[in-house]
Image (tube, coloured by chain):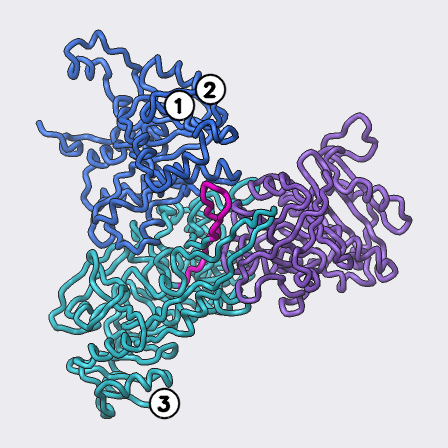
Amino acid sequence: MSTSLSQRPPIVTHASLPMVPTMARLIDRVQETSNTFTCRLEFVDPEAAARFRFYPGQFNMVYLFGVGEAAISISSDPDDLSSIQHTIRHVGSVTFAVSRLEVGDVLGIRGPFGSNWPLEACRGRDVLLVAGGIGIAPLRPAIYQILKHREQYGRLILLYGVRSPKDMIYREEVEAWSKRRDFQVMCTVDYPDPQWIGPVGVVTSLMRRVRLDSARTSVLVCGPRVMNREAAHSFLSHHVPEEHIFVSLERNMRCGIGQCGHCQYGPKFVCKDGPVFSYDSVRTMFSKEEV
Amino acid sequence: MRRDGMFAVAKDQLDPLICELAHDGYTVIGPTIRDGAITYDEITSAAMLPRGWTQETDGGHYRLKRRTDDACFGFVVGPHSLKRYLFPSRLKLFSVTRDGQGGFSPDVEPPPAPKYAFVGVRSCDLAAVAVQDMVFNSEMPDPYYRQVREQMFVVAVNCAEPGGTCFCSSMDTGPRCSAGYDLAITELSTSFAMEVGSERGQAMLERVRHEEADANARHLVDLMMSTAAKHNMGRSLDTADLPEILMSNLEHRQWDQAGNRCLACANCTLVCPTCFCNNIYDRTDLSGDHADRYRNWGSCFALEFTYHTGGYIRSSRRARYRQWLTHKLASWHGQFGTSGCVGCGRCITWCPVGIDITVEATAIADDVRESLKRHGSGTKTEEADV
Amino acid sequence: MAAANKKNPKLAVYKFSSCDGCQLSLLDLEDELLDLLGAVNISYFLEARRHVEPGPYDIGLVEGSISTQDEAERIVEVRRECRHLITIGACATSGGIQALKNWADVEQFKRTVYAHPEFIETLDTASPIAAHVLVDFELRGCPVNKYQIVEVLTALIVGRRPQIPTYSVCVECKRAGYVCVLVSGGLPCLGPVTQAGCGALCPAYGRGCYSCFGPCDSANPRALCGHFEQHGTRRGDLVRMLRSFNGYLEPFKQTGDEYESSLNTKQDLGVRD
């Protein structure tokens, strides 16, 4: 299970004003694909930096002056707090404004918010990660942690699906991971280019290639809604227990603290009860439309 | 020392009470007639109360009416609730100014919060404040809400004559105030029976003329309250197993019918004393050097409220109505351990086309209960997770 | 001023078939006008100044509907010379009052109104700008809310989404704390199906909204009109209510047309013999 609210790292923000962001500086940016980039941020205030800790799977609210806020998962290593990394696809006005920042510019951070991948509960089990597109970003901190304590886990498998080869993010890292003997990495694309020699098709189609020991596997899924649904149902049909299927949901989080109501999902607030849910806790809403 | 029991206070003591509250620096908010309804507004004397007035309410219908007597509080809730004072419809959270070096600095001066005394608050509205406390005054308190909440004074009124759309007794929130007040009034024909709910209430009581109420007055109040609860509610709702029924019947045909009638105009959510959804946004000036961050009332009925990268989560009116009703009566339990509905009836009265939450929920519940009876358990319902 | 602000975006304001009221709203800004002049270069605005700077322009504000062949051709030129095209007001966004002719016999109108109808060149319909060219943003209202103009321009300059609500007038009305004129007064108010933006101006003065901002995003005029009908509003009156400023916009058009086709008697229509 993921941690309860009281066990989570403190939220770095002005103590009495939960909506006020803390300033952070852009120190580096790497273009991952044509519309996706990874930026490294550093708190301007060293005290804020010293306070900031997070668990894999948590997110920050990123504030751009005059534009607004967007919920963005943290994609760096929780043990490396010299900087925070966010991998961002520019789809809205906030993310677009972030893409226009120059190194040295300042933005605002509130966070970390939300639940985390249950790496404790995965100990001693096989871990299967399923990522679709930018969904690999919130999984990356979990991958770092598992690789660091590799002996504590069983098999480690990543199934990663992207639209086309040029849409793959963290390409060099994924390649490095795939060369490890203790990490099975499989990638698939919807639209191959002439150089692509790997599988073609949706990420769930890769499951045929995996020998699954259902009873001892924990599954961590993050991707678009349709992929999440397909993946969860497909693991259920492979008899992976519901409570060992974890899905990180994308939703319209606005406040991060369960006060604005936007991200409600039945009885859950995705911002504080999620974004990582075990399948059994959201089962009733999962296949319903417009919940 | 706080004194238990009940006190008799002459009706002419209401004006001194209001003056004493004002004297202590409270902005006194109370019921008064404005634009054809009994609203909450600032009052400076008891003369501003709608004395001798009442109202007629039904689905999508509200009319002021003269009473045959000159009761001070012979009416029920109007369109306003305490929500607009604790959780204002628009509030500046903070300002941000560019510092000229690529950065910006937030002005974190906490917003000043007025000191309110609310007069004439009904038990459903006190229950609603307790519900909103769980949102705005818990783990991560909203500073403005907390400040108003901590310094407010409440003179509550027990409802002897519930209105046409009232169903607080179904929601177990009234008609008698049980907590959350400093003073509580039950209006008798010639005097007020007053109960004390706090030290502050006690101190205020000492400043107006009062005496111990006799046993007759106590019995009369008990009788009035039990009669109001049992016989005078305009609406009712059977809440037994309702959360499970609603959450496991998200595809019930009644949602389609409600969606066809619903205007998605958001009135129900805005008059609701517990609805807390809000939007947070930046206002910038043309220079681009200054931004104000505001919070205003949102609504799950607004399409843009459900906007998420790549589209709208609830694009149909049916889905938005379903979200609202299931949130009020079912999923609120999962979020906060209580119902989100206090039975004040405002959503029924102020729905322009008179859609009735009790009728819609009952239509689904009765259908499901009926079919469970016919077919045994579990045949009709989908899975529930409340 | 123009020379001092070379980098400021160039603004052009155009007029088509309209009353000029929306352009006047822009001039009516008073407090914000100087800030606006500091943030944009007004390069083409015949209502305000004769001096014209040549295009292309960064932002074009368009008032008015397309009612003549000449206008239908000119709007294509306007679109070509503006990077962002924003339509302002009911005429530009729905066809406006002029669009009432879309349901009528224009030749008969001409003969009735003009002594020499042969000199009048007009299309059979008045249509919104977006029916002719791509429009980047629409501001509703008759007239527009001047603060919405400032908001759109500010958002464009800052690079964020404009805060222009598409929900109902009721949201603004309730936020302001007004008492609902429909529920407490029985007035046929179109607020529940009308897009916010005016600040619930009419309900603030105790009268019903007549939808000069047009339908809101999820408008359900059929349900609202059904309710009015049950409470005694004649079908003919419902048709006229829906077809005032924005009758040519869906779903007002469909509901209005349905009611019109269901009119049986002159009493329904509410016309005198």
From the image, tell me which residue sits under label 3: B2
- Which chain does the cyan colour mark? B
Name the secondary structure under disc 1: strand
- Compared to residue B174, the image places residue A152 above or below, namely above
B278 over C21 or under it: above or below: below
* Residue to which mark 1 is pinned: C44
Q: Check if mark 3 and mark 1 are on a common chain.
A: no
Which chain has been coloured blue in this picture? C
User: What amino acid does circle 2 point to?
Assistant: Gly
Between B351 and A274, the one nearer to me in the picture: A274
Image point 84% across, 55% down: which residue?
A147
* Residues at discs 2 and 1 in contact (Cβ within 8 Å): yes
Chain that is purple in the image:
A
The chain under label 1 reads C
Q: Residue at x 39, y 29 (%)?
A: C87
3D distance between C-alphas at marks 3 and 2: 78 Å
Residue C244, x across and y down, in percent: 25, 32
In the picture of the structure, the residue carrying the numbered disc 2 is: C55
Asked whether the beta carbons under mark 3 and mark 1 sit within 8 Å of each other, the answer is no
Q: Given this view, does label 3 or label 2 mark the residue nearer the observer?
A: 2
Observer able to see residue B122: no
The percent coordinates of residue A214 (x first, y second) are 78, 55
Mark 1: few/some/many CA within 10 Å (<14, 14-19, 20+): many
Residue type at mark 3 is Arg
Q: Quadrant of residue B181?
A: bottom left
Name, please, the residue furthest toward the left: C273
